[in-house]
Image (cartoon, rainbow, N blue to C red):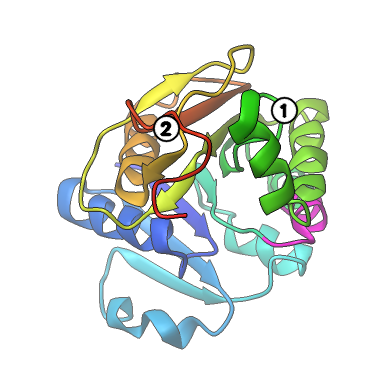
Amino acid sequence: MKKIMIIGANGGTAKLLIENQLNNTENQLILFLRHAERLNQYQANPRVVLVDGDVLDTDTLANAMADADIVYSNVGGINLAEQTTSILTAMNQANKQRLIFISALGAHHEVPGKFGAWNEKAIAAFLPGFRSSAQLLMNSNVVYTEIRPAWLTDNHEVNYEITSQDEAFKGTEVSRASVADLVARIIDDPEQYQRTSIGLDKPGTTADKPSWL
């Protein structure tokens, strides 16, 4: 049994991971989010601790992760690098090592061809945060796994392939359920994918842009 801290616990992938952990493991969860009442359905669950907080409040974040074995970051936004700095600082304060971090395709300039060029324009406002966060992770002393999903869908499927940090990204899309499945696998065996970045896509989705655009 492990204690998992989920930062940004109201996100779509995070909520799938919560259900995965509660239904398939005996792990305990620390759910950290702003306006924690949004997850009040878990308030009475003895395996869940709800923490209302802002990821930029580093001291509150560090206190909340005091008992955590693994930290999972589901945060995002234009100020992602600032949030990442707070998470890494909090982990150092709390003497925590294992971090699973959701990033995005393009964080390492790894998306080739027309799709890569399209992606650069489509998420231009967010890519600096992803790229700065990637560098922060590499320069840190935490044992991180950076996951770079393709464009996310809500399809009820688990179907994905993994590319390494040095490989060109392949497909254009992947389901949130697939991302949650991979995170659950790493939680189950934290020795996997240590201090590395991995891409995640659905096989057979190589194209110039995601299928719905």
**Could you give the CA–CA distance between mark 2 and mark 1, rounded to whole angstroms?**
15 Å
Q: Amino acid at mark 1?
A: His
Q: Which residue is mark 1?
A: 108
**Quarter that holds the N terminus:** top left
Please provide percent x and percent y for residue 40.
35, 84
Taking the image as shown, residue 100 lies to the left or right of residue 205, namely right
Instruction: Report the residue at 20% width, 52% height from top.
Output: 156
Instruction: Report the residue at 35% width, 33% height from top.
Output: 202
Where on the picture, by quarter, is residue 182?
Answer: top left
Task: Return the residue found at the far top.
Answer: 166
Secondary structure beneath dot 2 equals: strand
> Are there few (<14), some (14-19), or many (20+) residues within 10 Å of tag 1?
some
Q: Front-most of 84 and 98?
A: 84
Tell me where the magenta segment starts and ends, as one range: 77-87
Do tag 2 and tag 1 residues touch (Cβ < 8 Å)?
no
Please provide percent x and percent y for residue 43.
33, 80
Instruction: Report the residue at 36% width, 63% height from top.
Output: 15
Q: Front-most of 49 and 72?
A: 72
Q: Is residue 111 visible?
A: no
Secondary structure beneath dot 1 equals: loop
Where on the picture, by quarter, is residue 37?
Answer: bottom left
Q: Main secondary structure of the magenta part?
A: helix
